[in-house]
Amino acid sequence: MFGAAASAGLFDLVVGRTASAADAVASTTGGGVKVASSETLVAQLYGSLKEEQKKILCFPFDHPLRLKVDNNWTIVKQTMKEALTPDQCDLVKQIFMGLHSPEYAQKVFDQVEHDGSGEGSFSAECAMAMFGEPNASASDAAKNKFEFVLTGRHCTRRCDGNSVEGAAFGGPIFYGHAAQGFNEKPDHPKNAYWYQALRANEVYKALDGKQQKIALLDTPRKEDHTNTVKLTGKKQGLPGIPMSELSKDQQGLVKKVLDDLLAPFRKADADEAMKLVEAGGMENLHMAFFKAGDLGNDGIWDVWQVEGPNMVWYFRGAPHVHTWVNIRDPNVKA
């Protein structure tokens, strides 16, 4: 397994990339004991890989596969259970848990297992890959880049130690849930993420008739794998109603939507994402609701999104929840 000296090297690497990064990503238990950051655990995992495992799981940092996101896919053919030891699989679980907030981590993990074949499917059905080398010494930190990517059904998560410049969450991510079967009921019972749609619908209900006509679209939202969340850079003419046409109270409701969207993720990532959204201009955000996919025809819109020049957060709740996310720094070229 990865030695203490190498682990410390990664810790220095992360600190070198962003001020106080260790404090930013390390979590604390209820007893006040600090838990290793996901970045440190990624380095530990990489250091434990044997050469035959690296041939399956490891790629150059600039490999195009790193940029992909989809709703149900495995980044390599071998699942974690097939490619990793049980201890290594446990490290991946710890990495995953650390990428989420203490309030939501277990719920989100349970969702991934549920949407597989149940208990044990996290390692039996998900797959991971490593891009770059997350075990460089501190002296190599300026040149070293890495990204860990975890994939599965309703799961694309990333951990990069800020290697991917200007990208929230290390790049595009995906989450979803089919809580009670493929075709969920209109109220989505037990869905881990439906609360986000309920919050979004509070915005729609607060709009006047003229605003609702702008926000509600007849044309279905298109999906095209990674291009589903391709950023346009446009400040005007995006689908839906712009924030600039909302009252302060209505804008406050949109801010609550963003807070709820970010709630499942660790504070460092949520804070960075919000900072990047604000850099693109809150006034440039557009909120759209789509008639297509209205389960139960109840006017509680299951499909909606928030989009700006440098962000897309697209939530499709029909027939169950699929959510695509991409947020970038508007001043950093992808």
Image (tube, rainbow, N blue to C red):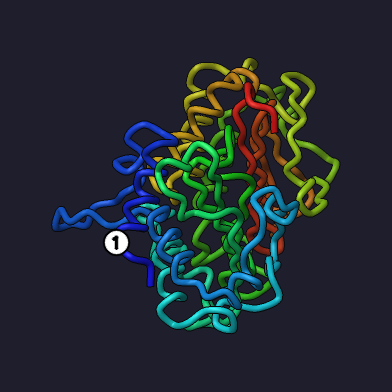
Residue in the image at 44% along x and 36% along y: 17
Residue in the image at 59% along x and 67% along y: 128
Q: Which residue is mark 1?
A: 4
Question: Looking at the picture, does residue 192 appear above or below residue 74?
Answer: above
Identified by mark 1, the residue type is Ala
Q: Residue 167: x, y in percent?
A: 58, 37
- Of all residues shown, which one is farthest toward the right? 219
**Where the C terminus falls, by quadrant?**
top right
Q: Residue 184: x, y in percent?
A: 64, 68
CA neighbours of label 1 inside 10 A, class few (<14), some (14 to 19), many (20+): few
Q: Residue 297: x, y in percent?
A: 72, 54
The residue closer to the viewer here, 72 or 165, is 165
From where the camera sits, is residue 293 visible?
A: yes
Q: Residue 307: x, y in percent?
A: 67, 33
Helix, strand or loop at mark 1: helix
Residue in the image at 56% along x and 70% along y: 179
